[in-house]
Image (cartoon, grey):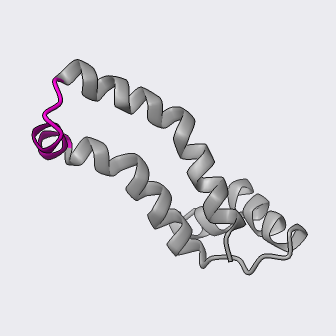
Amino acid sequence: MNIKDFIFSSHFMKQYQQYAKDHNKTPIHPIQFIMTIIGMTVFPFIASPLIQKLGDLNPKTFDNMLEERKTVLPKWIKAIMDSD
């Protein structure tokens, strides 16, 4: 199975499309949605040296912020899903 078929036929994508339909929302293009999720989850790791330097964060504080993302990311994703 190629990755494109895997993503577009995934249970997650079906749930997202059903959510948009049930809540009378115009669904975001699946690629936009995936890019947003990947960006919010991967970017902090890729840019960790820059983020730590800009925020004057020690590694422990940065790790705590990453832990906090586990609770805030679902809220941000839901806000994206609920927006028009």
Q: Nearer the viewer, residue 72 or 12?
A: 72
Which residue occupies 63% across, 76% down?
28
Residue at figure coordinates x 13%, y 44% from the top left: 54
Residue 64 in the figure: left or right of residue 69: left
Q: Position of residue 13 (x, y in %)?
A: 69, 63
State the residue in front, 4 or 76. Answer: 76
- Residue 65, x across and y down, in percent: 36, 31
Q: Quadrant of residue 64?
A: top left
What is the quadrant of the C terminus in the image?
bottom right
| Quadrant of residue 27 within the rendered picture | bottom right
74 sits left or right of 70 in the view = right
Residue 82 percent coordinates (x, y): 71, 65
Q: Left or right: where does residue 61 sit relative to residue 13?
A: left
Above or below — where is 20 with respect to 11? below
Decide whether residue 49 is among the magenta residues. Answer: yes
Left or right: 29 as drawn, with respect to 45: right
Q: Is residue 72 magenta?
A: no
Residue placed at 30% from the left, 25% from the top?
63
| Residue at the top extreme of this rendering | 60
Residue 76 in percent (x, y) is at: 57, 52
Question: Which contiguous range is marked in magenta?
Answer: 48-58
Q: Residue at x 53, y 45 (%)?
A: 73
Q: Is the stretch drawn in magenta largely helix, strand or loop? A: helix
- Residue 61: quadrant of the picture: top left
Q: Is residue 73 above or below residue 39?
A: above
Extreme residue in the right direction: 22
Q: How many marks?
A: 0
Q: Where the N terminus falls, by quadrant? A: bottom right
Q: Is residue 70 above or below residue 27?
A: above
